Amino acid sequence: MGILETSAILVSISALFSFLNYKFLKLPTSIGLMLIALLMSLVLIGLNALGIDAESWADSVLGSVEFDETLLQGMLSFLLFAGALHVNLDDLRSQKWVIGTLASVGVLVSTILIGGAMYLVLDWMGAPLPLLYCLLFGALISPTDPIAVLGILKQAKVPKSLETKIAGESLFNDGVGVVVFLVLSGIAFRGREPALGPILLLFAQEAIGGALLGLVLGYAVYHMLKQVNNYQVEVLLTLALVMGGYALARWLHVSGPIAMVVAGLLIGNHGRAFAMSDTTREHLDTFWELMDEILNTVLFVLIGLEVLVLTFSGEYLAAGLVAIPLVLLARLVTVGSIVGLLRLGRSFSPRVVRILTWGGLRGGISIALALSLPAGPERDLLVAVTYVVVVFSILVQGLTVGHLVAGQKS
């Protein structure tokens, strides 16, 4: 099946599910779409078990979609740029220490805590996994993806400072998490030396290089925008920045996600304030909001349908259910420790640790990274465990975090 047919089917399914969610379920869009897709997948599996071959068509559609490639090399650049475009740089600066520490130290500490705990628990369960694979799981599951919950936080009238912490952390820890994952996978599968020096050098190349590239490309496009007063050309320039910039980051072996976040922040703040007319701002916002909505819709439908092509067993499901509290506990310890230290010099809302812990959702990036691992029984186990954690995170945490933040005072 060609890319056009596959895209047409996925967009059509996404549109239908969006209608059903809007008309009947009335859940937040991402959560509702994923729930409907997951239920449809389970129905197809059930029909297949009864001897009705309803699953083969779905397998043929999903089999032509490389989820990890589609997200990591396609959707991610657009989603991160669109997300950064609407983050106020002044708000981000006011929370820079919290966001920076959670997105860097937080990801590293969470990776070690989750990796070590999974190594011990899986060994105790009789399904031992090498420590490096467990650390890879820690790296891919540590980045938060609060796309599905930001709408709920706004409806619950969360303090602006808390919303900035969650949005800012997610934008940067996606990039840091991918870099940590790449470093560990390089050691595990490409024979890189597991010495501190080369690891720090690779980390610096990816992270700092990505930030510098985003800054250079963002400023280049910013100066081009200042010389144009035509919204069609200006929207096209931002589209070229995202597509060409991400491709260039891959060629230079620097972090594309971090580059897109930095570029998006620059265009969304300096570009919006000094290089665009009101007409351009309106069209640019509309274009990227629509792009963000469409890609998120397709992404969460894909997550729900992905269960059709995953390898599941009772052992894998049990490991996934055990991983859920471990991931949450690691998040609680990490956030609690960082907030506890930063509280020595600044004040926080009373329930900020609980909200950041429960509101730190895992999403499609985690699944995509797991699917990018080399084929083998270790990969099958990690993909299944990751899927269970992500589904719980989006459906359970995403649907209940609104109650947790209700009544939170700034």
Image (spheres, rainbow, N blue to C red):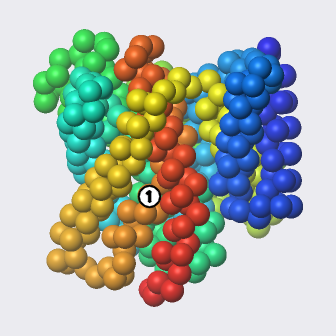
Q: Position of residue 290 (x, y in %)?
A: 76, 52
Q: Could you say which quadrant of the image residue 199 lies in?
A: top left
Residue under the image location 50 percent in, 45 percent down: 390
Residue 35 in view, yes or no: yes
Secondary element at image label 1: loop
Q: Quadrant of the N terminus?
A: top right
Q: Position of residue 73 (x, y in %)?
A: 57, 28
Residue 256 or residue 190, whichever sits in front: 190
Does residue 205 sit above or below 101 in this rendering?
Answer: above
Residue under the image location 36 percent in, 44 percent down: 322
Among all residues in the image, which is located at the extreme front? 50
Please name the amino acid that badge 1 sits on: Gly
Residue under the image location 57 percent in, 80 percent down: 157
Around disc 1, counting alpha carbons within 10 Å, would you say few (fewer than 14), some (14 to 19), or many (20 or more)? many
In the image: residue 21, left or right of residue 97 = right
In the image: residue 97, left or right of residue 150 = left
In the image: residue 230, left or right of residue 121 = right
Residue at image mark 1: 360
Residue under the image location 65 percent in, 54 percent down: 31
Residue 91 or residue 132, whichever sits in front: 132
Q: Position of residue 17 (x, y in %)?
A: 81, 47
Q: Could you say which quadrant of the image residue 51 lies in?
A: top right
Residue 317 or residue 409, whichever sits in front: 317
Q: Could you say which quadrant of the image residue 25 lies in?
A: bottom right
Q: Quadrant of the C terminus?
A: bottom left
Does residue 408 sit above or below 154 in this rendering?
Answer: below
Q: Position of residue 14 (x, y in %)?
A: 79, 42
In the image: residue 156, left or right of residue 261 = right
Residue 100 in view, yes or no: no
